Image (tube, grey):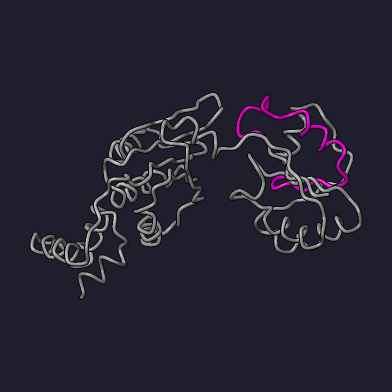
Amino acid sequence: MLILAATPIGQVADASSRLGEALATADVVAAEDTRRLKRLTSELGIEITGRVVSYFEGNEERRTPELAAMLRDGLTVVLVTDAGMPSVSDPGYRLVVAAIEADIAVTAIPGPSAVLTALAVSGLPVDRFCFEGFPPRKAGERTTAFTELISERRTMVFFESPHRTEATLRSMADVFGASRPAAVCRELTKTYEEVARGGLAELVEWAAGQEQGIRGEVTIVVGGAPADARTYTADDLKALVAERQAEGLSRKDAVEQVAGETGARKKDVYDAAHS
């Protein structure tokens, strides 16, 4: 059996008794960081009797067949990552697929999740949401990714590294609009937990005002596109681009600005402007 075991995202006390039992009795424990695993088991007061192997992004492709072979041999493998549920923006997906293909049972020990925790405390609609993982690192690719989400009605959840949070918020404000409601959740469940809420432009100012920079694990929650958003025709988009160009913007910048203002896909605005 393959067991995906959620680990605490901050407070060790959030670990379930099932997690401790699974780690103590597993034949094999595959861990994203074996040092963090050792620290966790020490804090939980348990001892792992099975074999411990590393399983992280750098060796996931190579180690998956090895772990799949262990599963086929009848061993119980417990997979843990640094925090939260394995395979959610963490290693695990490849092993789950391999186990299913080998007709091996796959189950989970549920527990803390930064995605759901951030969504719950954000103050944004939770009836429908989507998880978008980490945005692209490069500015151009990041803008393109956000542009594709302009018309997304569901609340969106993103992970981000602390040193890219300000740049990502600026990009979000440019594409989704300065007033789009959002929340930045930092160090969830930890001593210095902080949730900053407001329009994206306000959050850009909040990020820029952090004297020591943003620290810790960051999850960003962004409200979906308003249901009453206006529908723009190709002629409308073309006229708006022409207006922005008349104001001095380049064609490229005009297209990006109109896409952000209207919620239309950047490609649609581009096509309209060049029709």
Q: Residue furthest bottom?
A: 275
As drawn, 242 above or below 9: below
The picture places residue 34, in percent across and down from the top left corner, at 74, 44
Left or right for 156, reference 42: left
Residue closer to the observer: 112 or 186:
112
Reply yes or no: does residue 125 show up in magenta.
no
As drawn, 54 above or below 256: above
Q: Residue furthest right?
A: 73
Q: Residue at x 44, y 32 (%)?
A: 122
Left or right for 214, reference 270: right
The picture places residue 53, in percent across and down from the top left corner, at 79, 50
Number of marks = 0
State which quadrant residue 236 falls in: bottom left
State which quadrant residue 111 falls in: top right
Extent of the magenta region: 8-33
Q: Residue at x 85, y 35 (%)?
A: 24
Can you say which quadrant of the picture contains the C terminus? Answer: bottom left
State which quadrant residue 265 falls in: bottom left
Q: Is residue 160 visible?
A: no
Q: Residue at x 21, y 66 (%)?
A: 234
The picture places residue 180, in percent across and down from the top left corner, at 31, 42
Residue closer to the observer: 100 or 30:
100
Q: Is residue 262 visible?
A: yes
Left or right for 183, reference 11: left
The picture places residue 32, in percent across and down from the top left corner, at 69, 48
